[in-house]
Amino acid sequence: LPKSLFVICKQIVNASLHSWFSYSFGCIAFKDLQNASVPACFPMVSSTLCSIALDLVITLLLAQLCYVKCLLMLGMVRKGLSVQIFWYHIIGIVMYVWASLHQHRCLVILANLRKSKSGEVLSLNHSIPFGDWFERVSCPHYFAELLIYISMAITFGFHNVTWWFVVMYVFFNQTLAAVLCHEFYQEKFTSYPKHRKAFIPFIF
């Protein structure tokens, strides 16, 4: 029975990872929808994706706890509360919250470029964003997205190969998008800050 539970929990973890991978494709579709002229659908789609993301995070956490429980039952690890929480869990969670907060701030800055204080859209023209991580890179929200996925890889203990493939996918996807945005800014605005990098601060 314990061995069966062990196999089942591994399947739960793998299923959760695949679900999260599907969610990343959902985010791409959401960005395409956001670029379209459907402002009325925006709140509904945004709320739906946030709910999906929260459900997946909860599923991953529950699967990890179930996984640890099976390891205890099989005697593969020593018993005690300390086996459930390691240093990389704390670092991963702190990094996840930190990157998520910065991503939210950067998205608010982008949204406010076209809106008044009352929330009314004043212009659809592009302009140069300033503040927070925009002082260092052109696309800090993409950089924060990468950090969020890396933080989850850290929370898994660095050794989840499947998730590192997801991280690599996010890295190349966000890098391409960031480079294209950076080139657009440089071509459109002659006064664009020259010290800004495209994606990763101080690197590129």
Image (cartoon, rainbow, N blue to C red):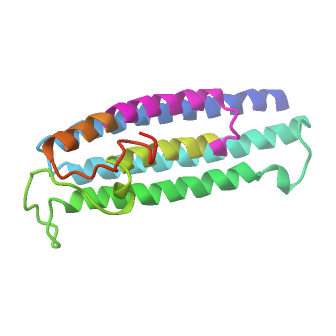
Judged left or right of residue 76, residue 16 is left
> x, y percentage for residue 67?
74, 39
Residue at 20% in and 39% down: 184
Task: Tell whether 59 sits left or right of 128.
Answer: right
Could you tell me which residue is drawn at 51 percent across and 46 percent down? 147
Q: Is residue 1 visible?
A: no
Q: Which quadrant holds the N terminus?
A: top right
- The residue lying furthest to the bottom in this view is 117
Left or right: 142 as drawn, with respect to 72: left
Q: Residue 54 at what x, y percent from top left?
A: 48, 50
Q: In x, y percent, where is residue 69?
A: 79, 43
From the image, give the main secondary structure of the stretch colored magenta: helix
Nearest to the observer: residue 120 or residue 16:
120
Q: Is residue 108 magenta?
A: no
Q: Residue at x 57, y 54 (%)?
A: 95
Q: Is residue 108 left or right of residue 12?
A: left
Residue segment shown in magenta: 154-177
Q: Residue at x 29, y 49 (%)?
A: 194
